[in-house]
Image (cartoon, grey):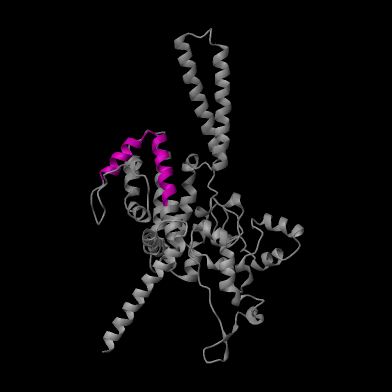
Amino acid sequence: MLNEVLRRVLHPLTFEQNPSSEGRYYKVVCPDGNFRRCKPVLAAWIADCPAYSILHHLEKQVCFWYECPNNKLGDYVPLDEQHPRWDDKLYRTLSDANPKTADAELSSGHVDRGFNMFWHIPWIVSNLSKPDLLHTMQIGMLHHLQKWIFHFMKTHEQLDKYNAIWLSMSAYHNLTPKNKSYEEVSQWNGKGMKDMSRYLLGVVTQSLRGGSPAQCPIFNHAIECTGPLLEFYMYARYKSHNDATLSCMEDALHYVHTFKDVFLLRRPGKEAKAKANALRTELVKQWKVDEETNADSWMRFMKRCEMNAWQDYINHEIDISKELDANFNFPKIHMMSHWTEQIRQYGALQQYSAKRHEQAHKTNLNDSWNASNHNLNYLPQVITVQCCILCFEIRELNLQTLAQRW
């Protein structure tokens, strides 16, 4: 349905509709009846990662700017070693070619077969995607960082200290006092993540003070990864940039990738989790067989000792399995490597934030939904209510303009 809607809206801009569009100019009928050469510009499409994958017909867990292999998404990519960009002309040709020969090449490039309207317009499609502070950083990387820190504190028995320092945060510079520990917060939003970024490094640093000599290097690496990631986010929020700030962003990102392995065990992917669960099931079966075999010879205290030994062995094997299969190959950590390039080309990232669109859901959808009868035919009612609201707003603006004239 989405591609059909886009086809109807963007069809006048396609190659076949305007032969002159190869030069990015179109012959358009103007209100005076004359034809003129126009150059419409598609500037950006604001969405989150799953929506971009659908729009570009890409598989999930794929960069929508460059052809980066899935197993390289977690690697640091310097500006002078970027992967090649997506070739929209090639994919348009393949989608129209023989399916038997084209499907394999499309699949090897992690591209889904099917009609994509963006391949048939004279723009570089990958340029339509813009960095999004809300989805990529606030409820993306910062949310991942929170989970990594939580499991890190739990593993090293610092969680109680972490929660105590978290709750001790006072109201300072518009920060609200905390009445819930991190574990008690059920859901985080963009504003909460934005506020949290102001004090998270201090909480982590104080929580990891006083470790044993063996723990100090690990704790320092956790701090050295947390700080640069928050620093990168702070720089990304700047409303203007120069070479110095962009260089600082690149340095911070390099430090993140240098010390991120300290959280590797807290980053098992879906495949790693599935493999670890299968291993746990197999080890539990072995434990049950061992228990039934020696049920008569084991005394009660021996049975308890064997049970504890088996549990420690299973947990150790699961940790090793997760650590071997864990990785950072997910799109959001990779996309940060392209942000400085995007800022140089298109300016500060604040102009592309999806925060305004997310806030509009309350008036555009939620209020209209509440005014409907909540039946199966709610969609026409939502549209009707929204049209009425817009009509009243336009009428109000017209009256204000007439009042100023008189």
Q: Which residues are magenta?
A: 142-168
Does 166 lie within the magenta span? yes
Does 55 lie within the magenta span? no
In the image, residue 154 sits, relative to residue 113, either above or below, namely above
* Residue ID at (59%, 62%): 56
Residue 103's quadrant in the figure?
A: bottom right
Q: Position of residue 161 (x, y in %)?
A: 31, 37
Residue 389's quadrant in the figure?
A: bottom left
Q: Position of residue 321 (x, y in %)?
A: 56, 34
Residue at the left extreme, as displayed: 171
Residue 212 versus residue 354: which sits nearer the camera?
354
- The image quadrant where one finds the N terminus is bottom right
Characterize the magenta stretch by its predominant secondary structure: helix
How many numbered callouts? Answer: 0
Q: Position of residue 221 (x, y in %)?
A: 43, 44
- The image quadrant where one finds the C terminus is bottom left
* Residue ID at (65%, 64%): 115
Residue 251 versus residue 285: which sits nearer the camera?
285
Q: Position of residue 269 (x, y in %)?
A: 54, 43
Q: Is residue 353 visible?
A: no
Q: Is residue 315 visible?
A: yes
* Residue ID at (50%, 67%): 45
In the image, residue 184 sits, relative to residue 287, either above or below, namely below
Q: Is residue 109 left or right of residue 172?
A: right
